Amino acid sequence: MLNGIPTNSLFDYDRYVEVLGMPDREQRGGPEIIEEFGCDDYMLNYSQNKIWAGHCLLSDAFIKEKGIDINGLEIGDDRIKVEKTFLIDTKSKKEIWIWGNSVLIIKFDSNDIIVDMRFSQKTT
């Protein structure tokens, strides 16, 4: 889930704008992409956060600052919240990878606070 939007359903640009607001910058694939795949590709920038979609699905989210959460976690949350959310022991690692149908990479600072997250899933 990205700000409450399922990440495993078709990418709905209007829903992302409704939840997150208009991006600071966006780039689309264009008519050729729509013709070939039936939907557009997107690169949406919200300040330092980036959301990419391709082949009608969310492909990647690069989260560097507050404003966008992944599975209820956002920049500034602590390690304990991550461990409770995923029912795992992170063993004080600086970077953890959580695998499923997608991968979520979470990086911590020296105070065990989330400073960076990356979500990625295969779209082809």
Image: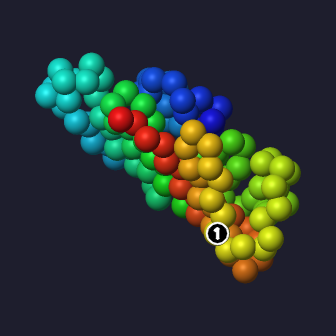
Q: Nearer the viewer, residue 120 or 2?
A: 120
Q: Position of residue 50 (x, y in %)?
A: 44, 50
Q: Position of residue 108 (x, y in %)?
A: 68, 70
User: At 40% across and 36% down in the image, what residue appears?
Assistant: 123
User: At 54% across and 55% down in the image, what residue appears?
Assistant: 118
Quarter in which the N terminus is drawn:
top right
Considering every residue shown, the one lying at the far left of the view is: 32
Asked if residue 89 shows in the view, the reply is: yes
- Vertical comparison of 9 with 83: above or below: above
Q: Is residue 3 left or right of residue 14?
A: right
Considering every residue shown, the one lying at the far bottom of the view is: 110
User: At 59% across and 29% down in the image, what residue appears?
Assistant: 6
Q: Position of residue 63 (x, y in %)?
A: 54, 55
Quarter in which the C terminus is drawn:
top left
Q: Which image quadrant for residue 8?
A: top right
Number of on-image labels: 1
Determine which residue is flagged by label 1: 95
Asked if residue 65 shows in the view, the reply is: no
Residue kind at label 1, given as amino acid type: Glu
User: At 59% across and 63% down in the image, what residue appears?
Assistant: 116
Q: Nearer the viewer, residue 121 or 31?
A: 121
SS for tag 1?
A: strand
Q: Is residue 81 left or right of residue 5?
A: right
Q: Is residue 114 left or right of residue 90?
A: left
Q: Is residue 69 left or right of residue 26?
A: right
Q: Position of residue 54 (x, y in %)?
A: 34, 36
Q: Which image quadrant for residue 112?
A: bottom right
